Amino acid sequence: MMMAILLVFLALPVLYCLGTFAFAGLLGSGGRRFLNLAGVRAVVREVWFQYQVWAMLPVDLCRSRWSEEPEAPGPIVILIPGFTDTDFIFSRLRRALSRAGCGYITYRYNTFRYDPDHEAPRLGRLIEDVLASYPGRRVVLAGHSLGGLLARHCLGLDPRYRRLPLVAMAVPHTGTKMARLAFVGGVRQAGPGSPWLKSLTGEAPPLLLNIRTEHDNLVVPPVGMGLPVIRDVVIASGWGHNSLMWCAEAIDAAVDWILEGEDDQGYAPQV
């Protein structure tokens, strides 16, 4: 019995990654981008990353609150995970933020009941609490995948949030066909052409850093990660949709951009 469980544990991350990369390659209008050394490297990194995610999953799900360290003197970054992401996915970014003197708070939602119309106001209340508890501190949002879409939805709810900086990492801004396979209705709204997604496809937030990978295995087609923004970082060194969160180039770009904005005084809406 234990051997069967172990085999399932070892097989599922591999099957998941191979399946999503194959789907992205065949239906994502650009499969040849995976047929090179960087593409193979992306698959290997994504598989290795998924093993660690699975190992940490019971620990993260048993915690009522995820990682927080808001007392650092620099900006406070609200980290917003994607669908099925857990606290673990931001571990390297959190360490980089701490080294840079930035604080952070990791937002948590219930994956199995995800609904953007419910979660965006909750995220808004967290932003309100942070702004009220740390007046004068710079507040930045950082979202991975669906978390970036949730952040954009939240920014559109209140004009006071319009100039809150947002780091969007592997975010399907104009949708992904993969969302149609999700087991939660709220996530399926991230499919191309959904009414909810259309409401987000207007003007991008003015302070937005978009970070994406050429070898994304969950955003199909890959143009879904594009936005007409000034700061667009494309990682070509072989990282997948989730493993991008461990890419040093992506993390450095995010932290550097957050620190560059320290002199921008337009970030602090009045509460």
Image (cartoon, helix red, strand yellow):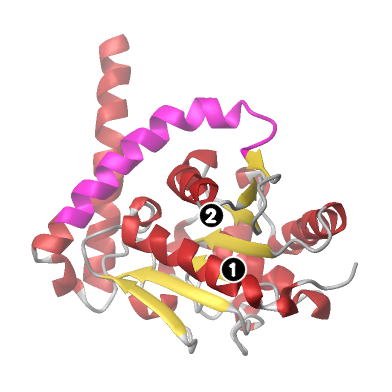
Say whether residue 168 is magenta: no
How many marks can you see? Answer: 2
Give the secondary structure at mark 1.
helix
- The residue identified by callout 1 is 149
Residue 123: where, in percent of width, then height? 74, 57
Picture quadrant of residue 240: bottom left
- Disc 2 and disc 1: Cα gap in Å? 9 Å
In this view, the residue in front, 174 or 240, is 240
> Quick one: label 1, few (<14), some, or many (20+) residues within 10 Å?
many
Q: Which mark is residue 218?
A: none
Write down the region rendered in magenta.
41-67
Left or right of 253 in this view: 234: left
Q: Residue furthest left?
A: 36
Residue 149: where, in percent of width, then height? 59, 68
In this view, the residue in front, 43 or 161, is 161
Residue 126, placed above or below residue 9: below
In this view, the residue in front, 99 or 70, is 99
Which residue is painted at 30% across and 36% down in the image?
Answer: 12
Which residue is painted at 62% across and 85% down in the image?
Answer: 206
Which residue is painted at 36% across and 50% down in the image?
Answer: 246
Please tell me whether the stretch drawn in magenta is mainly helix, strand or loop. helix
In this view, the residue in front, 246 or 98, is 98
Q: Is residue 174 visible?
A: yes
Say whether residue 59 is magenta: yes
What amino acid is found at the position of numbered circle 1 in the picture?
Leu
- The residue identified by callout 2 is 82
Specify which label sits upstream in the sequence, 2 or 1: 2
